[in-house]
Image (cartoon, grey):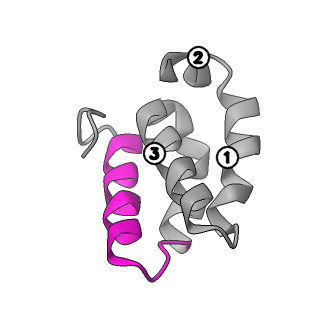
Amino acid sequence: GYELLADGRDDAVKILTPLLTDSDQTKRERALVALGFMGEAAGSAANAVQSEPGSDPHEKLLAAWCLRAIHGQEEAQGG
């Protein structure tokens, strides 16, 4: 499923990146998961992920996992 996002990475990143600052925590977390599973294909979103980790501990963990996955430091298997 997430391979489709990587195939259309430019469009996917354009859609997902603004969700990182959405007022709805669920939307922010889902955007982090999608970008993380995209891996290195989501590289252009790395700065946005790093600057918007949120205040919730779970969201911070997701952001850290997402960055590791984007930078190819971890297999994207859910953290």
Q: Position of residue 67 (x, y in %)?
A: 39, 53
Amino acid bearing label 1: Leu
Instruction: Name the residue nearer the viewer: 40 or 61.
Output: 61
Residue pictured at 52% horizontal, 61% vertical: 49
State the separation of the CA atoms marked 2 and 3.
14 Å
Residue on which disc 3 sits: 33
| Residue 68, numbered circle | none
Amino acid bearing label 3: Val
Q: Secondary structure at mark 1?
A: helix
Q: Secondary structure at mark 3?
A: helix
Local packing at callout 1 (Cα closer than 10 Å; few below 14, some 14-19, many 20+) is some
Q: Position of residue 38 (x, y in %)?
A: 48, 31
Residue interval drawn in magenta: 52-71
Can residue 66 be found in the magenta stretch?
yes
Q: Position of residue 44 (x, y in %)?
A: 61, 45
Residue on which disc 1 sits: 16
Precedes in sequence: disc 2 or disc 1? 2
Residue pictured at 45% horizontal, 45% vertical: 33
State the separation of the CA atoms marked 3 and 1.
10 Å
Q: Secondary structure at mark 2?
A: helix
Local packing at callout 3 (Cα closer than 10 Å; few below 14, some 14-19, many 20+) is many
Residue pictured at 37% horizontal, 70% vertical: 60
Q: Do residues under tags 2 and 3 come within 8 Å of each other at their CB atoms?
A: no
Instruction: Name the residue nearer the viewer: 67 or 60.
Output: 60
Report the label total: 3
The answer to whether 48 appears left or right of 65 in the picture is right
Q: Is residue 15 above or below residue 24?
A: above
Residue on which disc 2 sits: 4
Amino acid bearing label 2: Leu
